Amino acid sequence: MPRIDAKIGEVVDLFCGVGALSHGLKKAGFDIKAGYDTDRRCKYAFEKNNNSKFYARDVAKLTADEIRGHFSGTAPSVLAGCAPCQPFSTYKQRYDEDPRWDLVNSFALLAAEVQSDFVTMENVPSLLKYKDGAVFNGFKKILIAAGYNIKWTVAKCEEFGVPQRRRRLVVLAAKNNIPNDLAPTHDRPVSVYEAINNLPAIAAGESSPNDRLHTAASLSDLNIERIRASKPGGTWRDWPFHLRAKCHQKSTGKTYPGVYARMSWNEPSPTMTTQCYGYGNGRFGHPEQDRAISLREAALIQTFPENYEFLPENRAISFSEVGRWIGNAVPVALAEAVGRSISASITEGNDAKQRRT
């Protein structure tokens, strides 16, 4: 294995988005050399927060030489990526065929050619069963044939300090040793209260004067009534009948309690989605204020640092755009745990090499 310089290792991040995976690896001591994504609007956030360079490119069209060119050759190299997870959602598998699933295969083929010391991928657990497991099995076979030892696990994010109930598939692959297991960091889940209670109170449709990302979507008069009738951790079933949506007044709608609901202060949140800023989109009501959670609160629940910058000051905030970035992100604390696992593998590899000399 190459000699370690000041940083533990060097990372190229594919499908990098606004840089959550990179930021967790950076916190674990890695040098982020480059990030690639087709959404060029992610450039500001990725570069601003990760001291790195963003490239607006289609991963399926990258060459191994381009990727290898970012690595110095004097430190362990890591190819990281989170291919779009939407094709593997249970909804998509029931109702739609999404061509983006092939990006997992593109990532594996590129990794096999690049031959970095480590490869890590994060995605939704349903990837394991997509097309009867053929996509994930193909991914594994490509890496194994390229000389990698591979491990994977379905991580419970609350075991890694993420204040939400979220499950993610994490793959770790190593060229010269066995990847370390992903080690949980928290015996007790972090609560919503611990994550967001320090932020100032705002009303629906308002923003904090000190942090423009701490902004909450507007609510109609009807939804204001509904959220005032909502109990923390409760459902719309707690409301007076006249406040219920028409679909919930029918017997066929009574099996969907997880919308128009408040979070509970003392528990982790539900999974952050790309529409987590909307009160009617899930259990995204603030535990006590009469509004949905703000974009900053959603980012904190995804364990982005409170000072993480998503947009330059001269660019207007779009709830749908920033919400998509936040909801699609790898929780930063989980990414940091991935970095620590790779770091431990590097240390063990160096120790073994020293014992042989």
Image (cartoon, grey):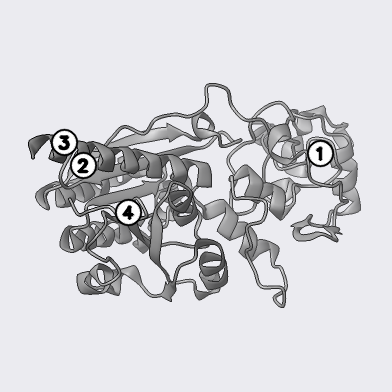
In the picture of the structure, the residue carrying the numbered disc 2 is 350
Q: What element carries label 4?
A: loop
User: Horizontal placement of 147 versus 241: left or right?
Assistant: left
Task: Identify which residue, 318 or 338, lies in the foreground.
Answer: 338
Q: Identify the residue at horizontal 26%, vertical 57% (top origin).
A: 75
**Dot in front, 1 or 2:** 2
Q: Residue 88: x, y in percent? A: 40, 49
In the picture of the structure, the residue carrying the numbered disc 4 is 9
- Three-letter code for the amino acid on which mark 3 is drawn: Ala
- Does residue 155 sit above or below 66 in this rendering? above
Q: Residue 80: x, y in percent? A: 34, 55
Mark number, residue 244: 1
Total count of labels: 4
Q: Identify the residue at horizontal 39%, vertical 40% (top origin).
A: 340
Residue 58 occupies quadrant: bottom left
Q: Identify the residue at horizontal 70%, vertical 53% (top origin).
A: 296
- Three-letter code for the amino acid on which mark 1 is drawn: Arg
Task: Identify which residue, 179 or 155, lies in the foreground.
Answer: 179
Q: What element carries label 3?
A: helix
Residue 172 occupies quadrant: top left
Q: Residue 99: x, y in percent? A: 35, 63
Mark pair 1, 2: CA separation: 62 Å
- Three-letter code for the amino acid on which mark 2 is drawn: Asn
Badge 1 crowding class, 10 Å Cα cut-off, few under 14, some 14 to 19, many 20 or more, is some
Mark pair 4, 1: CA separation: 54 Å
Sequence-first tag of 3 and 1? 1
Q: Identify the residue at horizontal 20%, vertical 54% (top origin).
A: 2
- Three-letter code for the amino acid on which mark 4 is drawn: Gly
Badge 2 crowding class, 10 Å Cα cut-off, few under 14, some 14 to 19, many 20 or more, is some
